[in-house]
Image (spheres, grey):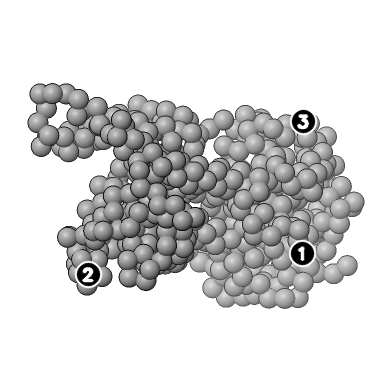
Amino acid sequence: MEYLLHIAIIILINIILSVSFNILMGYAGIFALCHAIFYGIGAYASTLLMIHWGFSFIPALLCAMVITALFSLIIAVPGLRIHWDYMVIFAFSFQMILYHVMLNWIDLTRGPQGIPGIPAPIIFGFTVESKISILLLYLVISSAVVYLAKKIESSPFGLVLKGIKNDELAVKSIGKNVTRHKIIAFAFAAALASVSGTLISVYVSYISPAYFDLNMSVFILICLVFGGIGKIQGVILGTIGLTALPELLRFIPSLPSTMLGGIRDLIYAVVLLFFMLYRPQGIVPETK
Amino acid sequence: MGTILEGKGIYKGFGGLQALSNVNVKIEEKKITGLIGPNGAGKTTLFNILSGFIKPEKGKILFKDKEITREKPHDVVLLGLARSWQGLRLFENLTVLENIVMSLPTYKSENVAKIIFVPWSKNKAKLTKAMEILDLITIKDRAFTLIRDLSFAEQKLVAVARLLATDSEVLLLDEPVSGLDEKTVEKVVTPLLRELVMKNGKTICLVEHSIKLVFNMCDTVYCLNQGEIVAAGEPRQLSQDEKLKRAFFQIV
């Protein structure tokens, strides 16, 4: 039971990540393979605020959202002025550089050793420690994020993002500022990804840069490709499937545990290739 | 009524090709002005410069006597000058209504929270305005159809509707009737453009290969050839000139 609760909690954290990435890639068509970095900035920001400055859970979560949104400007402001294929390389570099900063800025992040002893969240004086209470709390938070993402999708802002995905020049020709819309989309996506960072840090009560490497960014991308880029229902389904599927491997008795990681990566690669080749629209297609 | 949009001494080259040389145009308020010329004459380049999508090497663009040469394209639209595209560039995965609502300017009643978090379908003022525009363009019954499911003629009309939605005073139409049959042009497009000028007070500048439309609609015509204005005036007056008649009014 504890194990199932653990999987459910990880699924909820991953749903926030993929739904936030969907704002960028699904709505606005911005392919920025650095989402795990926003996840990581959120995790480190809230952890440091809680450990060194005595912030409680909710203020730390909110401050981490603002800090991560501000970090997103580092990539969004210069990056969105260049052609989209250079943007892909720019975002990839951002992922690699920030990952190595997390790994090597020992004084701040403790590097590969990570930061242990992150306190459990306290909500209205109640310490959320048991798995079931964490699950309920995370269910509320992830539902709020999904609700927010749905609101953005159907808003005038979301409509312009879809327009940008279709044809940027056409959006300019109807008087909409494409760069401003993209920067706001980046800030929202980053801020929401940081929520996942705060949630994983207080759940595991430990963080290290290994959680936020390129593989994580690729995993979020595969969740979208698998479920259907642009459609929230698809993104959620894709995330549930790809988080839960590799866990089934644990029930194969003859499989040594040392091989689990490798086989999981293999599954992701096969899923990505299969869907790109035979069903690029994913499980739930975006188009009406 | 005077000049609302003016291009003064415009030069533009692409590599070794001089697309526009010392081009001077004046677009009169609440009139229809035509730009004609063979392929490669520089008509679309001039449109791109007037609407801010490309910047001239030399020359100025004045809109209501204010220089807009270096303005960004979306700011040019907000000032009141919008353009359509030869390739239409509609948002094909969206419905007709979504295309129009998206093109409406931000209303004063809309704050940032409303723009980002409240569904556009709940903005009654915008929906009413969008439906009025679709009614004027005679495609109200297609409001909930995806753009890609429309006929080419209907898509052309949506392109005009999208321009109207921007609430711009000056509309630059790039080949509004190309690919349409004569009946649609006569029964739908011609009366529509007239109505836009006469009833709605719009100013129209159009690039067109259809000489018939230019003759029927335009108050002034500019003839472009190899990046230069070779003649300008009323279409009937220009057609009296044998050279121009051969070059622009028959062969084009």
What residue appears at the point 17 percent right and 38 percent down from the top-left corner?
A: A261
Q: Secondary structure at mark 2?
A: loop
Marks 3/1: CA distance? 34 Å
Q: Which residue is mark 3?
A: B141
Q: Quadrant of the C terminus of chain A?
A: top right
Q: Residues under labels 2 and 1: Cα distance?
A: 62 Å
Q: Residue at x 65, y 54 (%)?
A: B115
Q: Residue B83 versus residue B131: which sits nearer the camera? A: B131
Q: In the rendered view, does B171 fall on the left or right side of B40?
A: right
Q: Amino acid at mark 3?
A: Asp
Q: Position of residue B147 (x, y in %)?
A: 63, 35
Q: Is residue B121 above or below residue B199?
A: above
Which of the marked residues, 3 or 1, is nearer the chain's N terminus?
A: 1
Chain identifier of the residue bearing label 2 in the image: A
- Residue nearer the viewer, A28 or A102: A102
Marks 3 and 2 sit apart, C-alpha to C-alpha, by 62 Å
Q: x and y percent of residue B50 in the render?
A: 65, 64
Question: Hey, which quadrant is residue A117 in on the image?
Answer: bottom left
Q: Which residue is mark 2?
A: A105
Q: Which class describes the residues within 10 Å of circle 2: few (<14), some (14-19), or many (20+)?
A: few
Give the structural element (helix, strand or loop) at label 1. Answer: strand
Name the kind of residue labelled 2 in the image. Answer: Trp
Look at 42% across and 28% down and name the residue there: A283
Q: Chain of mark 3?
A: B
Asked if one can make out residue B153 in the rendered structure from this viewpoint, the answer is no
Query: Which numbered marker is on residue B27?
Result: 1
Quarter that holds the N terminus of chain A: top left
Q: Quadrant of residue B219?
A: bottom right
Instruction: Tell me the chain of label 1.
Output: B
Residue under disc 3 on the same chain as residue under disc 1: yes
**Image location of residue A284, percent across then percent down:** 46, 29
Question: What crowding class fits label 3: few (fewer than 14 Cα within 10 Å), some (14-19), or many (20 or more)?
Answer: few
